[in-house]
Image: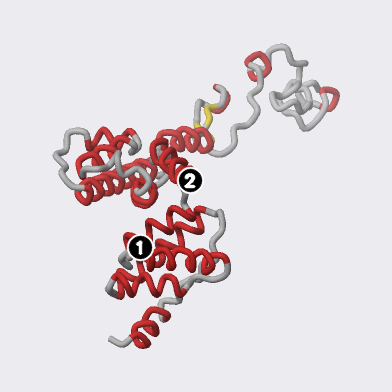
Amino acid sequence: MGQDRALERFQKFSPPKFLGGPDPERVERWLETMINIFAALNYAEDRQVQFAIFQFEGPARVWWYVIGAKWEREGTAWTWVNFVREFNEKYLPPIVQEKRQDDFIKFRQGTLSVSEYETQFTKLSKFAPKLLSMEQRRVRRFVQELNVEIHEALAAAQINTFTEVLEKAQSIEIARVQVRAFHAKRRGVPGGSQGQGQDDLAISPCKVGRGDGGRQISGTPKEITPSGASSGKGQARGASQGGQTSAPRVSCGKTNHTEDDCWRKA
């Protein structure tokens, strides 16, 4: 493939420009973007270096003029490994890399999902190659810093690769989320133990005194009159239980006339 055609394909990915600067996050992000683009294009290493340099501007381009001249003098091969080494020495110096290594050592899953934890774990692990020199060490470290419930579930599992441990951890996470959702749904079903007690209190019928024969009246309970008053004890003569005054009974036993007008008296 010709150089022009290769450059055109590269630019279709909209690679970002790089000016340099002390921000390690921006430096890492730019380098990761370049790595991802070249992984898709599958270009030779010398072409990868040339196209990465093509994105330099300002101070970064001035810096590369010095490095390029040094490579010419020393006969350094234009490989991606050599480019990354020079790039990291300039923009990710040892003090920054040591800070990143400390971040990795202290890194825990916390509130992250397993997928988010794996992404950050992989990103920071680049700064601690001695701690993860073997696949088994990487797996062990990954499991150790997972949250306790997932860590314990993986403790007895036979795991040999990082891909395998990631899949198992994600499966455990999904299962636990489903269990929590199931129990939460059960607690929220109407008619549960808490709701049942409140409903019974709201609609249960009340019993009134003996004057009503013990029958039940639905709806809101009426005020209960003290037992002495409900039986008529202690009330003035001629007063009904409801508190209304009735005419006194006369000789004939009727209440629609007075004693003086009663025919029995006559």
Residue toward you, 237 or 21: 21
Write the residue at 69% across / 24% down: 241
* Kind of residue at badge 1: Glu
Nearer the observer: mark 2 or 1; the answer is 1
- 30 and 53: which one is in front? 53
Of residues 78 and 126, which is closer to you in this image? 78
Q: Is residue 157 left or right of residue 27?
A: left
| Mark 2 → mark 1, Cα distance in angstroms | 27 Å
* Residue 246: quarter of image: top right
Please determine whether, in this image, residue 50 is positioned above or below residue 86.
below
Labels 2 and 1: the sequence-earlier one: 1
Q: Which residue is nearer to you in this view: 253 or 31?
A: 31
- Locate residue 151 relative to residue 159 in the image: left or right: right
Please name the amino acid that badge 2 sits on. Answer: Val
Q: Residue at x 35, y 87 (%)?
A: 5
Q: Is residue 106 above or below residue 71?
A: above
The image quadrant where one finds the C terminus is top right
Res 74 label? 1
Residue matched to label 2: 96
